[in-house]
Amino acid sequence: MSATIRKKRLSPKAIEAMKGERPIASLTAYTTPIARLLDPHCDLLLVGDSLGMVLYGMDSTLGVTLDMMIAHGQAVMRGAENACVIVDLPFGSYQESKEQAFRNGARIMQETGCDGVKLEGGEEMAETVEFLVRRGIPVFGHVGLMPQQVNTVGGFRTLGRGDEEADRIRRDAQAIANAGAFAVVIEGTVEPLAREITAALAIPTIGIGASAACDGQILVCDDMLGIFEDFTPRFVKRFATLAPQISDAAKTYAQEVKARSFPGPEHVMGAKPRS
Ligand code: KIV
């Protein structure tokens, strides 16, 4: 028998049970080395379709494909031992029917080995969420600002200011919880509403640009690491500022290559000693 005991990742049920216990720390991850670094500290790693914008330079998440999500899901799974790993269903892979959602959700689960899938939507997706959960696919919901609906909502903006909009978000969150989701992201939603929804739901809410009262928080990893030099949304706190460090390292490297000071004798094999 092998002496190595593989640690088990947190399950969606364990994440659900954390409501009322302690805040849930979540980050996005898209690659193996980053997953390895985040995994010991995070409860949940999300392979978000934000990877389209963060890694591929797209203007929105709409161009992200199922194959991209599966490739990055597999990469993150190679680096995660402790955290619950959830992979986003990308735009167009689940909205058509609950059968389409099951087929693609099952493919993500089978090909990546992840712990569940996330999908965006409220009341209109509740039947789909129930269909998936009853057939063995844990679902992480996502309400409030839904980036896959950027074209019908009219851009990325904070939602829930008017009564009608607030009421819709309230109903969306409740519908996804009633349908059996194990947790729900509340994105880009005014603070009092996110707080109220958190108090009303039996499942954990994970906030991004929402409220400190949410049951957990999530940020896009590259945002919180400060990998971008340009625009940082107000809800992002930079826990590191890597952009200037990366840029300085590249500058020094290029200077050394051009000056022939890199590689030095210690970086090459079988070099003749300098006379
Ligand atoms: O795609 C993503 O990264 C997300 C999080 C920001 C919640 O949906």
Image (tube, rainbow, N blue to C red):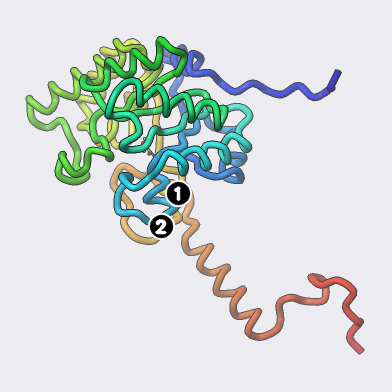
- Taking depth in this image into account, of 9 and 218 the one nearest to the observer is 9
* Residue 267 higher or lower than 11, as above or below: below
Residue 177: x and y in percent read: 31, 14
Residue 238: x and y in percent read: 42, 48
In percent of the image, x 31 and y 42: which residue is there?
Answer: 235
Q: Earlier in the sequence, mark 2 or mark 1?
A: 1
Question: CB atoms at circles 2 and 1 under 8 Å apart?
Answer: yes
* Residue 205 higher or lower than 269, as above or below: above
Which residue is under mark 1?
Answer: 222
Measure the alpha-carbon separation of dots 2 and 1.
7 Å
Residue 210: x and y in percent read: 28, 32
Q: Is residue 269 left or right of residue 43?
A: right
The quarter of the picture showing ligand 1: top left
In percent of the image, x 54 and y 26: which residue is there?
Answer: 110
In percent of the image, x 24 and y 15: which residue is there?
Answer: 175
Under mark 1, the amino acid is Asp
Under mark 2, the amino acid is Phe
At numbered mark 1, what does the secondary structure look like: helix, strand or loop? helix
Residue 79: x and y in percent read: 62, 37
Whether residue 25 appears in this view of the structure is: yes
Which residue is under mark 2?
Answer: 228
On the rendered image, what quadrant is the N terminus found in? top right
Instruction: Identify the image quadrant of residue 273.
Output: bottom right
Q: Looking at the image, which residue sits at the far left?
A: 163
Q: Residues within 10 Å of mark 1 (few under 14, many from 20)?
A: many
Whether residue 211 appears in this view of the structure is: no
Q: Is residue 118 left or right of residue 109?
A: left
